[in-house]
Image (cartoon, rainbow, N blue to C red):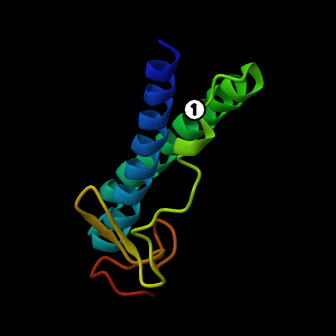
Amino acid sequence: MTSQANKCIRRALRIARTLMSVADEGDVQMRDDGCAVLYCVMRDCAYRLRKQAEREREAHRAKGIWDEADDPAAPDPSASAHGFTLNGFTVKGRPEHGRMGDKSEDGTKP
């Protein structure tokens, strides 16, 4: 049962990373403010999910029921200086544009 609970926590941490990656990829590809709002919501959900999963992981560590050998906090071996691929999404760093409203209607910066 404990290993299954730990597995679910690990999955939640992976889902949070995936949400963040999709939001980052979407930021690069977005065409309008509606998309920006969607990716902002995704990013917010990812942060909340990660925070709660990390709390649970720490609670399991404190109880001595967390297996450190499979800790998802370890660096992703597929990561590189040029970005990484996660669940089919390629992330090449943070988007270079600003927040919502920093672009004119035609997509260029004012």
> Is residue 55 shown left or right of residue 18?
right
Residue 26 shown left or right of residue 55 in the figure = left
Residue sitting farthest toward the left: 88
Query: Does residue 37 appear anywhere in the picture?
Result: no
Number of numbered markers: 1
Whole-percent x and y of residue 108?
35, 87
Percent position (x, y) of residue 78? 39, 69
Please tell me which residue is depicted at 62% across the width and 40% down the height of the picture: 68
Query: Which residue is at a point 71% across and 29% down the rendered structure image?
Result: 61
What residue is drawn where x is 27% and y is 55%? 87
Q: Secondary structure at mark 1?
A: helix
Residue nearest the observer in this picture, 91 or 97: 91
Query: In the image, is residue 14 above or below residue 80?
Result: above
Instruction: Give the labeled residue for mark 1.
Output: 53
Residue 97 shows up from this direction? yes
Question: Residue at the location (50% across, 30% down)?
Answer: 9
Quadrant location of the C terminus in the rendered image: bottom left
What type is the residue that disc 1 sits on?
A: Ala
Q: Along the line of sight, which residue is nearer the eye, 29 or 77?
A: 77
- Does 65 appear above or below 51? above
- Label 1, residues with CA under 10 Å away: few <14, some 14-19, many ≥20: many
- Report x, y in % for residue 11: 41, 35
| Residue reaching furthest to the top | 1
* Residue 31, above or below 92: above
Q: Point out residue 10 in the picture as x, y percentages from the top left corner.
A: 48, 36
